[in-house]
């Protein structure tokens, strides 16, 4: 008779052994990120992903380091061929104008994260998700906490 509780540790051990993870990529140096929207670019830099960001849209000009990154076209018309040629692990974009580009990239089996928050709560949720996807959860939590603290100070004034 097999012990029914023995199955769970074996499955857990296999998951750890094979490195299953909910993040899009591992934390090695081969991570390749493209950001197509200024807001997501700023968040990714704030999470400490400067080295992993390989390209941005022409509209992404902050922080200063974003200006030195390769360009993927305009905000409204990113160059899909250029994006594909850079072989990103994930592409971060926004909704609305970029929705069709996101859909095309997804059809081409590119990992895409769309950040299109409608309010502060959704923004914070989006930042935490970006942190999870990039293995920068701790940095994302600190960023959100810092923003919440500044908002509280403003409210008190």
Image (cartoon, rainbow, N blue to C red):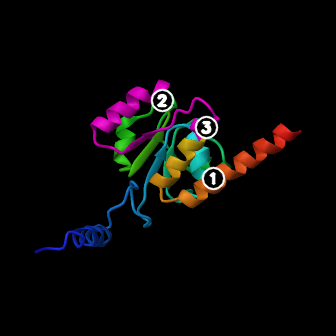
Q: In the image, which disc is placed on residue 121? A: 3
Say if 29 sits above or below 144 in the image.
Answer: below
Report if residue 122 is visible in the image.
yes
Q: Earlier in the sequence, mark 1 or mark 2?
A: 1
Mark 3 surroundings within 10 Å by alpha-carbon count, few (fewer than 14), some (14 through 19), many (20 or more): few
Say if 145 sits above or below 1 in the image.
Answer: above
Taking the spot 35% from the left edge, 50% from the top edge, the residue there is: 87
Q: Residue furthest top?
A: 96
Q: Which residue is mark 2?
A: 95
Residues at discs 3 and 1 in contact (Cβ within 8 Å): no
Mark 2 surroundings within 10 Å by alpha-carbon count, few (fewer than 14), some (14 through 19), many (20 or more): some
Q: Is residue 105 magenta?
A: yes
Q: How far apart in space, not on screen, are marks 3 and 1 (Cα)?
A: 18 Å
Residue 37: x percent and y percent?
54, 37
Q: Tell me if 10 is positioned left or right of 143 in this view.
A: left
Q: Which residues are magenta?
A: 96-123
Q: How far apart in space, not on screen, are marks 1 and 2 (Cα)?
A: 21 Å
């Amino acid at each position: 008779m097999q012990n029914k509780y023995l199955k769970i540790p074996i499955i857990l051990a296999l998951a750890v052994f094979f490195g299953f993870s909910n993040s899009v990529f591992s934390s090695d140096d081969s991570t390749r990120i493209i950001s197509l929207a200024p807001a997501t670019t700023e968040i990714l830099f704030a999470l400490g992903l400067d080295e992993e960001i390989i390209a941005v849209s022409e509209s992404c000009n902050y922080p200063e380091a974003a200006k030195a990154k390769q360009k993927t076209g305009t905000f409204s018309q990113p160059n899909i061929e250029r994006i594909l040629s850079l072989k990103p692990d994930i592409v971060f974009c926004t909704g609305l104008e970029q929705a069709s580009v996101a859909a095309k990239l997804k059809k081409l089996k590119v990992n895409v994260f769309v950040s299109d928050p409608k309010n502060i709560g959704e923004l914070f949720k989006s930042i935490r998700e970006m942190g999870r996807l990039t293995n920068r959860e701790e940095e994302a939590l600190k960023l959100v906490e810092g923003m919440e603290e500044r908002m509280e100070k403003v409210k008190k004034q």
